Amino acid sequence: MRLRGVGRRYGLRGPWVLRDVDLDLPRGALLRVEGANGSGKSTLLRLLAGIDTPTAGRITGRPRTAYVPERFPAALPFTAAGYLTHLGRVHGLGRAAAARGAEEWLERFGAGRHARTSLSELSKGTSQKVAVAQALLADPELLVLDEAWTGLDRDSRTLLDDAVTGRVAAGGTVVFVDHDPRRLAASLRGAADAVHRVAGGRLTTERAVDAAGASTGAGPGGPADAGSRGLAEADPRDPRVLAEFAGPRVLIEAQGPAGAPLPEGLPGAPALVPADSPVPPGTVRLTVVAAHSDALLRALLTARPAWHVHAVRPVDPPPASSAGSPSPTTESPPA
Amino acid sequence: MTALLRYQAALLWRSHRWLPPLMLYGILMVIGVQHGEPVLDSFGYAAGVLLPVAAWLVRVCVTNEPPAARDCAAAAAGPGRVHLAGILTALGASTALAATGTAVVAAIGDPRSADHQVPVDLWPATAAGLAAAVACALLGTAVGALCNRPVLRSTAWAVPSTGFAAILVLFAGGSPARAAVTGLVTGSRSGTVPFSPLPLAGALALTAAAVAGACALAGRRA
């Protein structure tokens, strides 16, 4: 999608909120928009989402678009699942696919038990999950997020981060505004990614992400980044791997349907590790940073066809940092 | 578009905001349409009272969604199409009222002229009554589209304007609504069923223009 000379003002003689915006939104790009309060960030996002029409200039090549507002106090006479099914169909899904997507996304956000709750009775955070779910439901080609993380709990913020990196990895475009300057910072490394700033009604490119950073792969603190770009074959005990993905890791043993490959775009950059004892056919062992383990488990359990998780346990610390005292390994019961 | 219409129709039905305009229509019909009255007079009255009701239904449908939810739908389908779906849902509801009202009048009215002397053919009379009612539903929809969001955004302007415009369209000379209603009332005096496609065609053209204008503004005036 391209913006050429785009401007927007409210009313016939109102001041220009935005002027002369030229912007390309390539496929597979993650774009961050920054700016002070009232600078026109939200106006830009509304233009990008197609909610508002530009007063001047042209927007061409609009893909299938979805938008998440900052607050979603939707006093609508629908249940959460009912609303999502309607919106899924507006996004172009068939009846069955929309209903299935609604249930799946609510489940993923841990709001499955609210599927039959009326939207007007939902808490602020759960309403926001519904707003995020309606946008992700139909795999949009352009996803516009206006502080969509506000009000979400920690797991849901991580899940949304993973969904964003997943959309970008799948060739979609994601534009976002967030007050947290570190939001998705680790993922803003692709060749097409950029940070733009709105000030004084103009849009400037604050930081075009350098292509070198992207070509060398994940940099420090890049689990979410690498997560979008596939699995890495790695030994979890290798100190270099641990240095790259800092923090305690969790080992997940999962079994897929016969012959099924691992689902693509798994969150948290799980590393595939060889089994140290015989395992049933179709079983894989993955390690992931503990912070991403919940999201990875959810992704496996909600994959189609579904995976069975046999074991989840913390990975032993590397020998270097735990001199001669191996910590006890705790097996958790099969999920 | 089908998905949007289904969404807007479900929204209207489940919000129960159709109840006040439906009650207005019901009360006006009970006051003005009585058993054994000349059928063409009653058709004219039933068509006339439908016009403000149709305008009110448009207001209900285009203000039914909270802004955040409207934005989500607009991003998915475009603001013009979302607005059009709301207006068409309202038009569907008022057309259903037109059909119901016409059926009730045909069932309880006296198929004779205003002085109860000349018999009137019931089927052609019912067709003329339905055409007049649909013309008024269309013009009421046009009034609703031009007197509400996104054209008039504040309630303080929108509600009085809708009322005044409905009265104006009903009584102003040259209005297709007035032509449709007077055609029936005049025909009732002589016991002849009026047949002129002009009011309905005029109403259709005016409404299409009004709705297209309102939908084109939908993304421009937030």
Image (spheres, coloured by chain):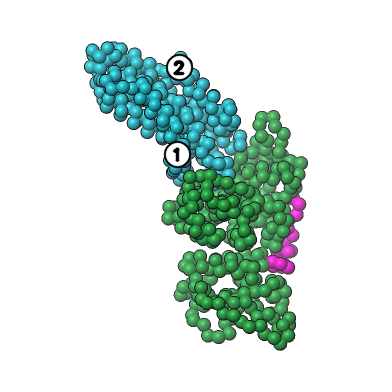
- Identify the mark nearer the N-term, 1 or 2: 1
Q: Nearer the viewer, residue A18 or B10?
A: B10
How crowded is the residue under tag 2: few (<14 C-alpha within 10 Å), some, or many (20+)? some
The residue located at (67%, 45%) in the rendering is: A42
Q: Chain of mark 2?
A: B
Using the rendered view, name the quadrant where residue A326 is placed.
Answer: bottom right
Q: Is mark 1 in CB contact (under 8 Å) with mark 2?
A: no
Q: Which mark is residue B171?
A: 2
* The chain coloured green in the image: A
The residue located at (53%, 36%) in the rendering is: B63
How crowded is the residue under tag 1: few (<14 C-alpha within 10 Å), some, or many (20+)? few
Kind of residue indicated by mark 2 = Phe
> Disc 1 marks which residue?
B16
* The chain coloured cyan in the image: B
* Residue A212 coordinates in the image, percent (x, y): 74, 64
Work out how far the residue at label 1 is from the one at label 2, CA to CA, in angstroms. Answer: 31 Å
